[in-house]
Image: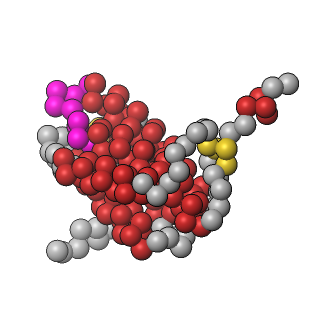
Amino acid sequence: MGHRLTKIYTRTGDHGTTGLADGSRIDKDDKRVETMGDVDELNCVIGLILTEELPAELNHDLIQIQHILFNLGGEIAMPGFDLVRANDVDMLESRLDHYNESLTPLKEFILPGGNRAAAYAHLARGVCRRAERRIVTLNKSLNTPHQLAQNFLNRLSDFLFVICRYINYRSGVSDVLWKNEFSKA
């Protein structure tokens, strides 16, 4: 592969537009760009999780998810292309089940926290849910919605929730349970 980005700044976005992969230009606050931005932010937060010490299999899974998220962003940037596949969604379901099987059933709501890696995973879950809301909004405006991408983000938020608990479990740290008495005055 040759050099794809030889010059980082182009000045083509100085007037509030950006280029899509098909060469068309759209406003930087377009639903498509907002969705791409949230997917990119999600990928960044997953990168933050990966700076922490994790079990090797979880590290591998998160890197694989980052690649799929990059494809998902590319799919959104290329009108008419589908880069997220059904087996990407299936993989997430399988890995979600794998990590969840070692956890005790959840009887209470949990708050973001535990150790730092789990807290980062909670942050990623929140960003993922925003990205999912954005793609739902985007899909309503398209003739051919990104349905598998939407499904992937839906499963990914569940996956991230489970790995929050899994990371805490593997670290010997308890989940932070929500206690209703704090809301009573």
Question: Does residue 150 sit above or below 67 in this rendering?
Answer: above
Considering depth in this image, is 156 or 179 the residue closer to the camera? 179
Main SS, magenta residues:
loop
Which percent across, then down, holds residue 38?
42, 45
Which of 6 and 128 lies nearest the eye of the viewer? 128
Say whether residue 53 is left or right of residue 175: left
Residue 138 picture location, percent across and down: 31, 31
Q: Is residue 180 left or right of residue 166?
A: right
In depth, the one of 184 and 136 nearer the eye is 184
Residue range highlighted in magenta: 141-149
> Which residue is depicted at the point 42% across and 66% down?
58
Q: Position of residue 139 (x, y in %)?
A: 27, 30
Give the answer, above or below, for where 7 lies relative to 90.
below
Q: Position of residue 176 (x, y in %)?
A: 67, 49
Q: Quadrant of residue 18?
A: top left
At x 26% / y 54%, what residue is drawn?
A: 91
Residue 173 shows in the view: yes
In the image, what residue occupies the spot 32% across and 67% down?
Answer: 7
